[in-house]
Image (spheres, grey):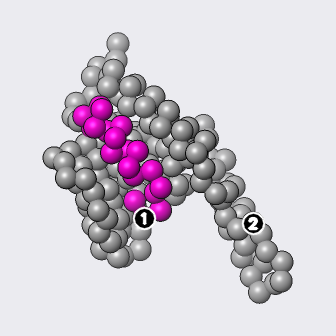
């Protein structure tokens, strides 16, 4: 038997490069979930008792550290940062990229390995004329739709617990 997990559902947003903040606010409102928008600089957030802006120092990984320290089994973390995703999974949180891709125990290892390979390739290409891909593909409507669907799925599951 699964025992209920105490506390409110909280969505922790790695806000600096997140293109789905408005969608998060709308879905969170439907589920009466708390939202923490975490960044190194202030972002405009809706006026709401449940949505709070968290501005951390500009220290290296300060936002990631805050999110990882506050993540738990009642949290949904929205980030594209693979290493942050791993930390949050270890804390028991659900983790989504802004395109709807879900990180979980079975996918995080290969994501970290791919990240390391790409980092090595980029380092090896430094100073050469050749280049390796220009980053992730552009964010599109299908990504936004997939994100909304996955966020809804995760929140339904957490609300049942």
Element carrying mark 1 = helix
The residue most toward the bottom is 127
Q: Which residue is mark 2?
A: 133
Residue 65, percent across and down? Answer: 36, 61
Magenta segment main secondary structure? helix
Magenta-colored span = 15-33
Badge 2, how many Cα within 10 Å: few under 14, some, many 20+? few
- Whether tag 2 and tag 1 are in contact, CB under 8 A, the answer is no
Image height of 140 relative to 10, above or below: below
Q: Look at the image and say whether residue 136 sits in the magenta stretch.
A: no
Q: Which residue is mark 1?
A: 16
Residue 135, percent across and down? Answer: 67, 64
Element carrying mark 2 = loop
Sequence-earlier tag: 2 or 1: 1
Image height of 142 relative to 122, above or below: above
Badge 1, how many Cα within 10 Å: few under 14, some, many 20+? some
Task: Return the residue nearer the eye: 17 or 107.
Answer: 17
Structural distance between the alpha carbons of marks 2 and 1: 22 Å
Image quarter of the N terminus: top left
């Amino acid at each position: 038997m699964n025992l209920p997990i105490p506390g409110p559902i909280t969505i922790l947003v790695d806000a600096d490069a997140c293109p789905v903040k408005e969608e998060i606010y709308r879905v969170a409102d439907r589920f009466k979930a708390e939202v923490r928008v975490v960044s190194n600089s202030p972002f405009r957030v809706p006026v709401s008792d449940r949505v709070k802006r968290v501005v951390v120092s500009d220290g290296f990984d300060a936002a990631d550290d805050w999110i990882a320290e506050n993540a738990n089994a009642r949290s949904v973390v929205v980030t594209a940062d693979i290493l942050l995703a791993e930390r949050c999974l270890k804390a028991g949180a659900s983790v989504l990229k802004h395109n709807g891709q879900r990180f979980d125990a079975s996918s995080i290892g290969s994501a970290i390995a791919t990240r390391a390979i790409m980092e090595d390739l980029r380092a090896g290409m430094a100073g050469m004329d050749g280049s390796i891909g220009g980053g992730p593909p552009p964010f599109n409507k299908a990504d936004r739709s997939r994100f909304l669907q996955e966020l809804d799925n995760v929140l339904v599951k957490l609300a049942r617990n």
